[in-house]
Amino acid sequence: MSSAELLRLDGVRKYFGLRGAPWRTGQTVKAVDGVSFVVRKGETVGLVGESGSGKSTLARVATRLLDPTSGRVEIGGKDVTRFRGRRLRPVRRTVQMVFQDPQASLNPRQSVGTILSTPFRAQGTRPTRAQLIELLHKVGLSEEHLERYPHEFSGGQRQRIGIARALAVSPDLLICDEPVSALDVSVQAQVLNLLADLRDELGLSYVVVAHDLAVVRQVASRVAVMYLGTIVEEGPSDQVYAAPAHPYTKALLSAVPVPEPGVTRDRIVLTGDVPTPISPPSGCPFRTRCYKAEDVCATTRPVLEPVNGQTEHRAACYFPEPPPS
Amino acid sequence: MSSSVAGAVSPTRQALHRVRRDRSARVGLGLVVALIVVAAASPLLVKLSGQDAFTYHIDLLDPARGNAPQGSFGGVSGEHWFGVEPLTGRDLFSIVVLGLRTSLTIAIVVTVVTTVIGTLLGITAAYVGGWFDAILSRLLDFLFGFPQLVFMIALGIIVPAKVPRTVLLIGVLSVFGWAGLARLIRAQARSLVTREFVEAARSVGSSGWWVITRELLPNLLGPVLVVATLSIPGYIGAEAALSFLGVGVPPPTPSLGRSISDSIAWVYTGTDPWFMVFPGIALFVAVLGFTLLGDGVRDAFDVRLRRTH
């Protein structure tokens, strides 16, 4: 794969300072702690992890809604790490975001027409009514919805409006932060199908952030697994799902229910909770809950390395799982 | 929820529609409109009555009763509809309608100024955060802790007479008046800025000004309108109080507050209680009208908060 890079993150860190009580000043939450990550044109990358693993923060750094504490963000081959305000405006036309909660991401005081014209106005143009209607058609809504207000729609419809807004600036890459987690299961499939249709129709690329492995498996060609602010495993979906190399990925996958009745699977039950990102463990962030941890894991943090000779499939572990025989 | 094709109405419209259906709010609105018409047309009304607020009519006073007006009801007659002022014999109707205009003008101007400043600074503090928010919050604390009344009285005495008192009153009431609204709006806006639609607006490239005026402000219109309408009677009262204390609008400019202040002695001695009744009723009706309207606006917007989407 050598097609154009839409997004490149290099050693990105995002720390949040803790405020409030005096004894907490100076402490930081290491939400994202050294992530490197590339999205090429035409790809759909799934970003999975539990709550608090930093995946939503990473999505917001990648869209430059948040400033990274350190590291580099390149969008469309351009270093935009230090861009702010007005200079970011043209960058917005490359990368757009779809938000988790379609209820909260639409302004309750604005009609759909106003919501959809905001991106045009922000970019300095005025949309025609035909353009707005075309956007609605793209996401499976119709002209009659233009004058309505968000509370008059169902959750799935609201998410379609959110997607239409992101499409308004004709972006190349959509970063979807948990696009379906707030929706009913039946509606989830519809929205995921819509995303797939739009990919084929408009040549879009996606980063789909999700905690649901099944969702990511359905849409993503490549998967990155996050734990405590770092990527612990990354690779083509079929390889990662068939042969997880990192113990954490293996444990996650073993928790996915098996659809065939009667078939059971050896489930790896992780003990304890995710450590606090205020003071993550030394060395490998996963070692405190890992069933394979040894002394070396506590000293140096493992880096992503190719697994089983596959250059595309990489894991950050000293004792990667052997491929299934 | 109405979801017919034609039934798409913005939430703000729905709330204003509820105001119109609320009976006490309608009464309030009627009173407010009537008062504004009277205040706006006061010079005309005064001319219509054939009087003015400045001519002395000593002949209508009764020196035997300490120069209280002759006749019943404070000297009410076909010429002097509300009677005359004791001691001077000036036409009380003219004084009341022109005083109403003074009071309403000051109250409305102060409300507009404080509402615009308080709303914009409150939203900006919540949206920008950081040092701007910290400085504004300390300034608000300072204004809240400040002995406003003492300061206003002192200022009324110190400031040279060249400065028109009306302007001084508007300025002083405005300086202290925006703090309450700013604090309320800042608190409400802080819960709004964490909502994803603000991020969504930023992510499509909207400017900060756009987010503040187009995304956040419409969601705060409810509390802004409520506080604004309810603060008008407060400022009418404040202006009257300052005039009552002698640091408000100076004579001979008519002022409801000063007339009421002047009337105290006449009520106390029982020689002319009517001197207080007419300006008192005008002040009462003004405060009542704006309060009823404000309550209606508040109820209309509260319903939205209780409604489940």
Image: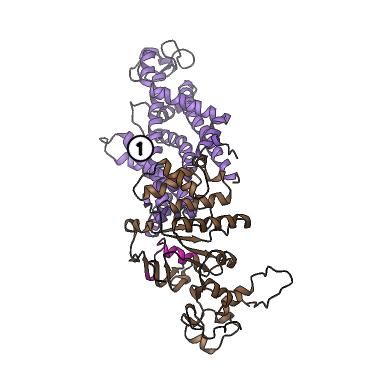
Does residue B161 belong to the magenta stretch? Answer: no
Q: Secondary structure at mark 1?
A: helix
Q: From the image, state the color of chain A.
A: brown
Q: Nearer the viewer, residue A246 or B120?
A: A246
Q: Quadrant of the N terminus of chain B?
A: top right
The residue that disc 1 covers is B170
- Span highlighted in magenta in the image: A56-72
Residue A325 horizontal/vertical position (percent): 61, 84
Eyeballing the image, is B123 above or below A28? Answer: above
Eyeballing the image, is A223 above or below B58? Answer: below
Q: Using the rendered view, name the quadrant where residue A14 is placed.
A: bottom left
On what subunit does the disc labeled 1 rest? B
* Left or right for A295, reference B56: right
Residue A198 horizontal/vertical position (percent): 48, 56
Q: Using the rendered view, name the quadrant where residue A35 is placed.
A: bottom left
Which residue: 46% across, 26% down?
B33
* Left or right for B275, reference B4: left
Q: Can residue A267 be seen in this snapshot?
A: yes
**Amino acid at the residue labelled 1:** Ile
Chain purple in the figure, letter: B
Q: Nearer the viewer, residue B269 or B21?
A: B21
Eyeballing the image, is B132 above or below B64? Answer: below
